[in-house]
Amino acid sequence: MNLFEIENDVVVFSPQALMIEPFKKIWDADKTNGKHKATLILAFIYYMADERSDFMHILDIDERIAEVKVFIDMPESFSGKSKEVTRAIHYYEKLSETTSTKLLKSTRLVLQKISEFLDNINMDERDPRSNKPVHDIGKITSSVEKIPKLIKAINEIEKEVINEKALKAQSGNKTMSMFTDGI
């Protein structure tokens, strides 16, 4: 569902977003003129949950919250973890979920695990009985050589997700009736 878009480097939301209960609750809670606080929180939700966000590569939620807060100049007191915000983020993720976004999320997690594995390899580690290296350098270098293919693959998946969202936005998320498509 395309409830949020970027226009002129600003997050904007569709009027129908304010009809959805978790977003409406955030909007209604802001009693200020101009709804600046609610607009910031809705932008925060976009950057935290939408696959098109420039922050989705940050898999650690606390790190992503910190980066998004700085980027959109949220007050230091804003935790990003209130019940209302967490619920709205979760709801937006569920509304936006497709097969492509599930695969993208899984691929990112796999790449994160590979990265953590490579970060934690101790090439000096030895088997106590044989005194031979625990890690096979050949297998490690072979794995490292495959990383560019993995990066290319995740970039392709990201492009596909963006294209999928663009197509849904153009079609207005319309579903065709049985007789419309000639069946």
Image (tube, rainbow, N blue to C red):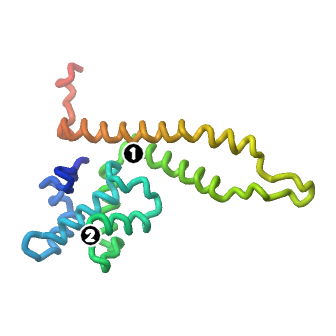
**Above or below: residue 109 compared with residue 35:** above
Around disc 2, counting alpha carbons within 10 Å, would you say few (fewer than 14), some (14 to 19), or many (20 or more)? few
Q: Which mark is residue 122?
A: none
Residue 52 seen by the camera: yes
Q: Quadrant of the C terminus?
A: top left
The amino acid type, in three-letter code, at marker 1 is: Thr
Q: Which residue is mark 1?
A: 101
On the image, the x and y values in percent for residue 45 come to 29, 61
Please tell me in which quadrant of the rendered image residue 40 appears: bottom left
On the image, the x and y values in percent for residue 43 come to 24, 61
Around disc 1, counting alpha carbons within 10 Å, would you say few (fewer than 14), some (14 to 19), or many (20 or more)? many
Alpha carbons under labels 2 and 1: distance apart: 28 Å
Q: Nearer the viewer, mark 2 or mark 1?
A: 2
The amino acid type, in three-letter code, at marker 2 is: Asp
Residue 99 seen by the camera: no
Relative depth, front residue between 110 and 96: 110
Q: Which mark is residue 73?
A: 2
Position of 31 with respect to 65 (left or right) is left
Q: What residue appears at the point 92 percent right and 58 percent down from the top-left corner?
A: 129
